[in-house]
Image (cartoon, helix red, strand yellow):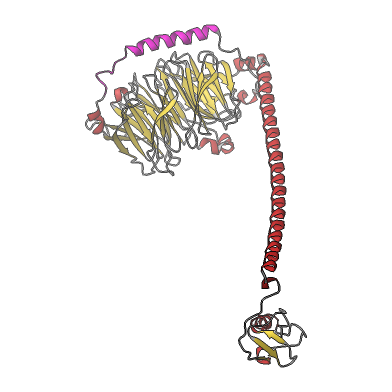
Amino acid sequence: MHCSVSGEVPEEPVVSKKSGLLYEKRLIERHISEYGKCPITGEPLTMDDVVPVETGKIVKPRTVQTASIPGMLGMFQNEWDGLMLSNFALEQQLHTARQELSHALYQHDAACRVIARLKKERDEARSLLAQAERQIPMFASEAVIANSSVLSNGKRAAEDDDMGQPGKRVRPGISASIITELTDCNAALSQQRKKRQIPPTLAPIDALERYTQLSSHPLHRTSKPGILSIDIQYSKDIIATGGVDATAVIFDRPSGQIVSALSGHSKRVVILLCLLLYHCCLVKLVTDNIIFIVDKSELALLYLVRGSLANPHRISLLSSPHLYTVRVWQGSEDGNYDCRHILKDHTAEVQAVTVHATNNFFVTASLDNTWCFYDLSSGLCLTQVADTCKTDGYTSAAFHPDGLILGTGTSEAVVKIWDVKSQANVAKFEGHVGPVTAISFSENGYFLATAAHDSVKLWDLRKLKNFRTLNLYDSDTPTNSVEFDHSGSYIGISGSDIRVYQVGSVKADWNCIKTLPDLSGTGRATCVKFGPESNYIAVGSMDHNLRIFGLPGEEAPLES
């Protein structure tokens, strides 16, 4: 007797009362639980309609194939043949899958090559177009600028709005005489550096260890708090700060008085550029008679009256609807300021300005992926260098102390070193995470410090390699600035606090000698600057106060 479902002798036979058919118990139970009917007749069936059948325990007979050795060998041969056929089919499927994958990868590689070639051709076309545009003379534009009305007390005459878009300036390039001037300056400074000694008046380490807050000066508006940049004129101990409120403040530290507040953005421009103005001002004090004020959409150069800004007039830095311009302002004896040059070379926000050691030239770096080399007296852009590599633009820049090397930081975490004479990219430093927020060359000419979101990295310019990384903060706290002091003995770093390190060497340790807290309560110290001989440290944060740290008893009033 055989099971009606499997056709084999059942181990636990049961019989249906309705149909009289024989089943294996486990098979009919599963079928009834799933369908509730007889698998043969299709009639409704339950386990109550099934009766078990008692049988004697017998040994199952062997099949004919297993009854003899030749039969078993034949069965094994059949099993082996089936296994080989199955394995061959699997190998065929694997070979077909490999061919399809190889074809897909080849197509992907070919598509990537085509895309790369098209991008290269696009970049070359853009470069050629930019070079062609630069060759178009702008004689008419220069005549308009020369005959334009001057600025009086920071207010531009009405006809300024009718100047129109200027043409492109001719880029004469860096001439042989300028290269000779740069080379002579480099040779002189290099010779002086060999004889350089640490000044005896430099603040010693034990003094810096005792630095504490001496004063706090509310220089900027509380409605838009935040100081984003600081620079110091060492000869007169004047501090310039640039804030989120789109105002640059000139502060006389010894007297504790504000010398001038440079502001005056119009409402019309604020509405158009509110996102830019909230990330305003980079301030750079260069010599006794020049101040650089860099807005993310404009750069203004102010010639001070006889070396001092005695008249605190408000000067509109964004009085023109044209964006991303560089303006050169000159102060007159009556305290007014005249716009001498309007330079419209960048097509995106100006992020950095750095002045050559001769004080005759300066460089601006922008998010348009170019940096411009200017003559300071004429305001002429001698050359505009575009990076052919795909980047999102420059976020920082600094001249080497000797002046023949320019360092730039990009928004893609790359530091690039340029030869100023040939405008060639001679080195590239990688390893940061996030935009490079600050670059500082040491006075010894050997070390370069760069700050980004992740850390501060120290580079040896002689071997072009990173020899130390200072991981100061957690992953959510960016490093906002890094600055060597003028002697090259100390380095200051700002993030969630301010840390001062003693400058070591490639092999010697760089020890943290002082950690200054961020007393603004914002947890974000944005900039740090050493005073003359490191006798004090100026700190800016995301509140409206400029804080001075130094030895107790060496500062005048605590508030101004």
Q: Can residue 152 be seen in this view?
A: no
Q: In which quarter of the image is the C terminus?
A: top left
Residue 453 relative to residue 192: left or right: right
* Residue at the extreme front of the image, as rendered: 69
Count of marks placed on residues: 0
Q: Which residue is drawn at 41% across and 31% down?
A: 457
- Magenta residues, as a range? 176-202
Where on the picture, by quarter, is residue 516?
Answer: top left
Of helix, strand and loop, which mostly describes the magenta segment? helix
Residue 92 relative to residue 549: left or right: right
Q: Is residue 199 magenta?
A: yes
Q: Does the magenta stretch include residue 412?
A: no
Of residues 138 and 74, which is closer to you in this image? 74
Of residues 139 and 528, which is closer to you in this image? 528
Q: Can residue 273 be seen in this view?
A: yes
Query: In the displayed structure, would residue 70 be above or below residue 393?
Result: below
How far across and down, in percent of the image, does residue 283 sit? 44, 27
How far across and down, in percent of the image, does residue 14 sit? 67, 88
